[in-house]
Amino acid sequence: MMLSHGARPKARIVVLAHNEERRIATCLASLPLGEPGIETHVVVNGSTDRTAEIARGFAGVEVHDYQLGGKSRSWNSFVLDEASPAGALIFVDGDAQITPGSVPALLATLSDHPEANAAAGLPRNGRGAERYRAAMIRDHGLFGDLYALRGSFVERMRETGIRLPEDLIGDDSLIGALAKTDLANEDDWRDERVMPCERAGFVCEPTRLSLGSIRGQYARMINYSVRHHQNRIITDIMRGPGPGALPRTLASRYREWLPRFAPRRHPVWWWIDRQALRRMAARAE
């Protein structure tokens, strides 16, 4: 059953958060809470900490606490199953802080570019931020930390039954591809359907070197490797039958694809890929 909030909001901010009790308050404090015509929802997925409790302490924020983990599963559940239509949806990661004026800038970009299905915020800090910004502007890239989707685009996803695979790691690559193809296959790819927004930006907390951060980075690198291999499956689908053929889970395709995968020869990625492929084999359906 879809949530209804009376008149269709101009924008709905969707904060996706998993175990972000350290950063969620900073994230929410950076948002235009209570602004007329803008709703803010925090979608907590599979968290075991105080993320949902802290978010509930902010006026003007509605919290949706899903027990099952998985960013893409929660994206589907809230955006496609639960939320009512909105003029635009603005997605923010729960560990990101957006820069002032980012929300109106994203909305203005969609308004100024009627051909665009998405508008992308740019990174403002971190190693390589300048390089990433330049690449995003050149290639019309999209990061999951901050982006906006036109409401009518989301409605067409709902109507056509196109969903993110529930076990997809990272939503941004596939969301960008869906936006650029206008929900078709790659024959209809148009970069201008994702517009970079230079007036919208996000800041992420720098990683501090510690034993815990090293362990966390190792786990992230294995996730990045799984994502790398998942993207090969998705690319094959997007170049062929198109997004209507995306499976409920990518694990359902692992048995078919694992014989085609091999660790990269890079001295770092070789070991990481071995761990990722082992994990994928254990989860194959």
Image (spheres, helix red, strand yellow):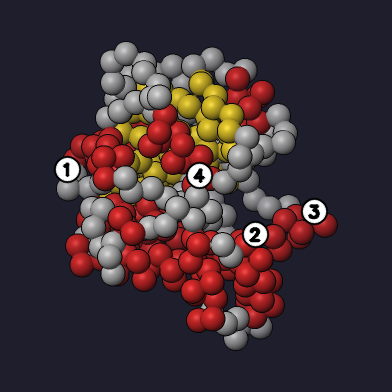
Instruction: Locate residue 81, reporting x and y percent.
Output: 40, 33
Q: How many marks?
A: 4
Q: Which residue is mark 2?
A: 220
Q: Residue at x 72, y 56 (%)?
A: 216
Q: Are marks 1 and 4 in contact (CB under 8 Å)?
A: no
Sort mark 2 into few (<14), some (14-19) or many (20+) by Cα contacts within 10 Å: few
**Location of the C terminus (image quadrant):** bottom right
Which labelled disc corresponds to residue 212? 3
Q: Which residue is mark 4?
A: 73
The relative height of residue 262 versus residue 146 in the rendered view (above or below) is below
Which amino acid type corresponds to the residue marked 3 in the rendered image? Gly
Instruction: Locate residue 4, reporting x and y percent.
Output: 36, 18
Name the mark nearer the viewer: 3 or 4.
Answer: 4
Which labelled disc corresponds to residue 161? none
Return the residue nearer the eye: 131 or 277. Answer: 277
Tell me if residue 97 can be seen.
no
Name the mark nearer the viewer: 2 or 3.
Answer: 2
* SS label for mark 2: helix
Instruction: Locate residue 265, reporting x and y percent.
Output: 60, 86
* SS label for mark 4: helix
Residue farthest to the left, as pictured: 114
Which labelled disc corresponds to residue 114? 1
